[in-house]
Amino acid sequence: MLFQPDMETMPLGKLRQLQSERLRHLVAYVYERVPFYKKQLDEHGIRPSDIKDIGDLHKLPFTKKNHLRDNYPFDLFAVPMSEVIRIHASSGTTGKPTVVGYTRRDIDIFSEVVARSLAASGCKPGMKLQNAYGYGLFTGGLGLHYGAEKLGMAVIPVSGGMTDRQIMLLQDFQPEVMSCTPSYALTLSEEFAKRKISLDSINLKTAILGAEPWTESIRKQVESGLGIDAVNIYGLSEIMGPGVSNEDVDEKGSGSYIWEDHFFPEIVDKDTGEPLPEGEYGVLVFTTLTKEALPLLRYWTNDITNIYYEHSSKRTHVKMGPIRGRSDDMLIIRGVNLFHTQVEDVIQYFVELSPNYQLVVSREGNMDEVEVRLEIKDTFSEILTSTTSHQELRGRVVKKIKDNIGLTMKITLEGPGSIPRSEGGKLNRIVDRRKVY
Ligand code: DLL
């Protein structure tokens, strides 16, 4: 379903005109209101009047996460606090969080893009959404909440974790839709199997999964474990929160529509910052075309993906592929770039393995080593007691990883339940022992 058909199917020429108008206004707006941007543009010798249309975007400098940190907490806000009605923050792993603010109009647009995303996922007014994203400073909980209300759904605001309660509510309230991280959806599907709960006792049709990278391997597992369609939602606090892009349930696996009337995407080379042609992989960069409280020019997300148009699809907006990982999480192992999603991709070829895994990176001498901890499924646990089948499976996994990724990794096969599970939030699948704290 299309929530805002006029926008979602706007002919590309008209969309470009709208984006150009919005960009011209944005550049003048930040130049006047945000001292950081005035200084940036002056230093680059750019006057707002130099930016005439969306094709001029590449002339503008990037905004990076450290610029937000340097202006902590509120110095990039373009409006006085009297116009800000909400503040969120993304928890940094180191140091201070990144702080974001919203005017009333920002919250309206945030709700609209999430409503679009939910509609694309197959949600309809009158359906119930069990929202298991965390409520709080994280944008996931409230972002999904407001968007679902905007669409006309009944929201069950459970927040993250509390698996017993999630299962009870799925059974008692019979929601058709659930939203949570993909790793938590996996935890739930495993709990259903472990507790032998029949899928007939729930009414779930769809899960809206995002906030961390995930692959077709997890999709397969979650869809069969819960009897649902699993649909991708992407976003980041700096740009808005969830709902920057979303998959259409009928076009699953072919990418997520970016709502480009609000968030203008570019893909740039991670080393040079040069814009890359359609379809190539690089760093995703966004310009917020309509944000009032925290407008950002060419924000460097660090997420690695590609963008492309599919002319036969329902909407005119550009699509993005799945996020391979963040360039700051990318491991460089003996000169080869590695994202953990590449290992996740390989797991789906082995019926014996559960989709849970962990990468442990260490340094032996001058060499970086990766150990992949994998888990044997319950139904194949005899492999763990037979040296021959254990070795045979390990050999096949080592070979598949070498063939697909180009690296030889150490494989450790472990019993069911030994790898850490998501307890509701984002799951970190990499343990890096090279770091000295
Ligand atoms: O994670 C917003 C969100 C909430 C998105 C709920 C989807 C659902 P942050 O905490 O600021 O915001 O983290 C943003 O998470 O730059 C990506 O690296 C990653 N990320 C978000 N969605 C996806 C996704 C929220 N669908 C960062 N696939 C982003 C892969 C994702 N990575």
Image (cartoon, rainbow, N blue to C red):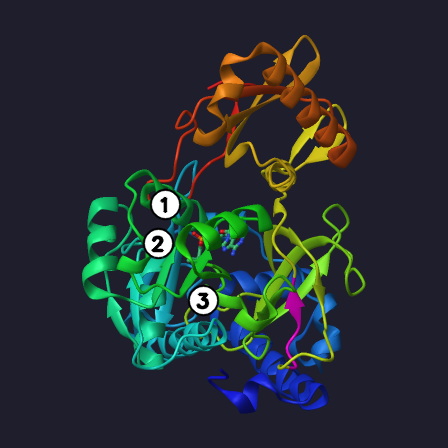
Magenta-span inclusion, residue 252: no
Which of label 1 and label 2 is nearer to you?
1
Percent across and percent down for residue 271 are 75, 45
Residue 38 or residue 172, whichever sits in front: 172
Which numbered disc, 3 or 2, marks the residue that appears first in the sequence?
2
Q: Secondary structure at mark 2?
A: loop
Against 247, residue 162 (above or below) is above
The range drawn in magenta is 316-320
Q: Residue at x 65, y 64 (%)?
A: 254
User: Which three-letter amino acid code belongs to the residue tagged 2?
Assistant: Phe
Q: Is mark 1 within 8 Å of ligand 1?
A: no
What type is the residue that disc 3 sits on? Answer: Leu
Are the two marked residues, 1 and 2, in contact with CB atoms closer than 8 angstroms? Answer: yes
Q: Is mark 2 within 8 Å of ligand 1?
A: yes
The answer to whether one can see residue 323 in this image is: yes
In this rendering, the count of numbered labels is 3
Residue identified by numbered label 2? 138
263 and 420: which is toward the camera: 420
At horizontal 49% and vertical 49% (from top left) the residue drawn is: 212
- Nearest to the eye among marks 3 and 2: give it: 2
Mark 1 burial class by Cα count in 10 Å: few <14, some 14-19, many 20+: many
Q: Residue beneath label 3, please?
A: 294
The local secondary structure at tag 3 comes to loop
x and y, in percent, of residue 279 in the image? 77, 62
